[in-house]
Image (cartoon, rainbow, N blue to C red):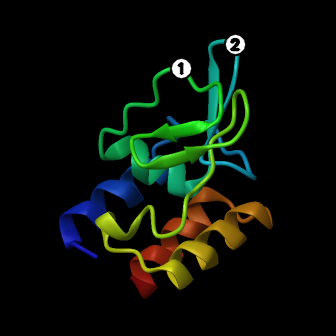
Amino acid sequence: MDAELKAKWVEALRSGRYEQDSGSLISRVGRRSSFCCLGVLCDTQGTQWGEIGDAGLLDGIEVRDAGRSYLSPFALARFGLDESQQQKLAGMNDAGRSFDEIADYIEANL
């Protein structure tokens, strides 16, 4: 993973600007958005989330139902994450590890 990209992602995870969620890259309820750690990566790289609604593709990310977005296979390879790294990070996020803990892991392992 590119060092500059990694630093930007880690900073965003630790910033307090993102509310953490699990099970999808981004979840929206009204004007409130919450993110998985991988959704934070997408957001820092300028992903245009648009209006998440019907099933389809949004900026290379598979959207399966209203208000929630999910990864299509290898969707984050463009950011230097292979499938096993994506699964590890999503698993940490969905198991309740904090963004700070995940940022520590990213710094040490990616």
Q: Amino acid at mark 2?
A: Gly
Picture residue at 57% right of the left edge, 61% below the top: 100
The residue mark sitting in front, 1 or 2, is: 1
Q: Position of residue 101 (x, y in %)?
A: 61, 68
Q: Residue at x 54, y 73 (%)?
A: 86
The picture quadrant where one finds residue 43 is top left
**Tag of residue 39:** none
Q: Is residue 105 above or below residue 68?
A: below
**Which disc number belongs to residue 30?**
2
Residue named by callout 1: 51
Q: Count residues near mark 2 (Cα–Cα under 10 Å), then give few for <14, some for 14-19, many for 20+.
A: few
- The residue closer to the viewer here, 106 or 15, is 106
Disc 2 on helix, strand or loop? loop
Query: Is 13 located above or below residue 76 in the figure?
Result: above
Mark closest to the chain's N terminus, 1 or 2: 2
Residue at point 57%, 68% (across, down): 102
Q: Which three-letter amino acid code belongs to the residue tagged 1?
A: Glu
> Which of the 4 image quadrants contains residue 80?
bottom left
**Residue at point 21% right, 72% down?**
3
